[in-house]
């Protein structure tokens, strides 16, 4: 995974093979499958590069079809579904070994004025600088071993992630009406170029990182849980307003439901000055291994 901003920018760039066909490189990583946020970010870049000039992406709806192989590049095939005066739609299919591994539809719009409202930044959220780094201050100290901490720092060093509270024991956000809640301050760990696509791609990359962990909060640790089979199944982003991914943004996550081996999570994305800039939804596989005894609500 990228260990610096320069590596992140390099990773998220795509090689043009021919019209509407791109190839994405793979990072140096110890993980056994391609990180879903990488494929999503690549697909967003591919779709945006084929959109008409002057159009901004406003929604992104994706499905993860198969695990990606980190040892070979991924090819992204973009199909133009619509190019209208106000809106444009692109479909992107990612392939490896001749098979689709990911598909998304991205919608673009010419910026325009209109009615405005948005929810407010939650009250009582601590400043990012007052929050511990995610892997250094988990509510459950047994959830993250020294080895996992080193692996996190090796794989995710391009991002600064701070724990702003959760519904885990000792996390400070326990709420009977919301069974799972997690707040993280996140930013790219360095300065990105001013190109808005760089910021959207970096945000999309990071947006896949913590959501499944939020769905597991009522059931035990996510990081280092060897009794759990976890994978993103789908991923949706609505982009509301422009922002910089290299400045602090709050990932305000909640999981209203887990059932059938799947967990559902939503996230609101706020800038530090309180603007709601994006909304995210994801359903993922959170399946206990067959050998794991659990009561249906709380894995043992």
Image (cartoon, rainbow, N blue to C red):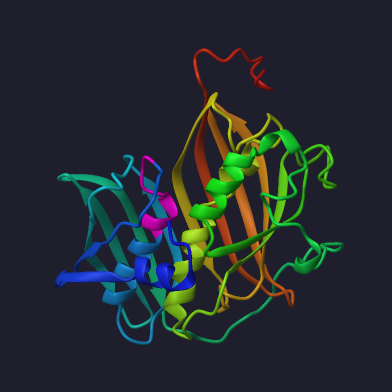
Residue 237 placed where, x, y %? 50, 60
Question: Magenta stretch: residue 119 in it?
Answer: no
Please tell me in which quadrant of the rendered image residue 142 appears.
top right
Residue at 68% from the left image edge and 68% from the top image edge: 270
Q: Is residue 74 above or below residue 151?
A: below
Q: Which residue is at the front of the view, 128 or 177? A: 128
Residue in view at x 37 percent, y 40 percent: 32
Task: Answer with left or right where residue 248 lies relative to residue 87.
Answer: right
Foreground residue among 48 and 55? 48
Q: Residue at x 54, y 27 (%)?
A: 226
- Image quadrant where residue 273 sits: bottom right
The quarter of the rendered structure image containing the N terminus is bottom left
Hey, which quadrant is residue 224 in on the image?
Answer: top right
Using residue 6 as the reference point, say whether residue 244 is left or right of it: right
* Residue 120 makes an appearance in the image: no
Q: Is residue 212 visible?
A: yes
Residue 108: x and y in percent read 39, 73
Residue 87 percent coordinates (x, y): 37, 76
Q: How many marks?
A: 0
Residue range of the region highlighted in magenta in the rendering: 32-40
User: Relative to residue 26, is residue 261 depicted above or below?
Assistant: above
Q: Is residue 67 above or below residue 271?
A: above
Looking at the rendering, in which quadrant would you find the C terminus? top right
Residue 101 point in image, percent of width and height: 28, 45
Position of 243 with respect to 66 (left or right) is: right
Q: Is residue 213 left or right of residue 206?
A: right
């Amino acid at each position: 995974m990228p260990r610096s901003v320069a590596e992140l920018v390099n990773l998220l760039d795509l090689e043009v093979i021919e019209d509407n066909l791109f190839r994405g490189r793979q990072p140096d990583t110890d993980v056994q499958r391609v990180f879903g946020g990488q494929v999503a970010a690549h697909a967003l870049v591919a779709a945006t590069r084929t959109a008409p000039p002057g159009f901004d992406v406003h929604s992104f709806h994706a499905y993860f079809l198969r695990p990606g192989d980190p040892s070979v590049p991924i090819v992204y095939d973009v199909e133009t579904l619509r190019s209208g005066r106000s809106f444009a739609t692109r479909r992107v299919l990612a392939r490896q070994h001749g098979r689709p591994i990911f598909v998304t539809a991205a919608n673009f719009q010419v910026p325009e004025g209109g009615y405005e409202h948005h929810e407010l930044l939650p009250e009582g959220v601590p400043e990012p600088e007052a929050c511990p780094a995610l892997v250094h201050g988990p509510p459950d100290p047994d959830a993250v071993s020294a080895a996992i901490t080193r692996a996190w720092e090796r794989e995710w060093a391009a991002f600064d992630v701070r724990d702003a509270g959760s519904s885990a024991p000792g996390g400070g956000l326990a709420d009977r009406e919301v069974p799972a809640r997690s707040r993280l301050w996140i930013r790219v760990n360095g300065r990105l170029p001013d190109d808005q696509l760089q910021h959207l791609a970096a945000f999309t990359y990071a947006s896949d990182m913590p959501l499944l962990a939020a769905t597991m909060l009522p059931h035990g640790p996510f990081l280092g849980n060897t009794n759990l089979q976890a994978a993103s199944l789908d991923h949706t982003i609505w982009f509301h307003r422009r922002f910089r991914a290299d400045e602090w943004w709050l990932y305000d996550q909640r999981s209203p439901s887990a059932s059938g081996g799947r967990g559902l999570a939503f996230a609101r994305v706020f800038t530090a000055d309180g603007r709601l800039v994006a909304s995210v939804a994801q359903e993922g596989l959170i399946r206990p291994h067959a050998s794991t005894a659990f009561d249906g609500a709380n894995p043992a």
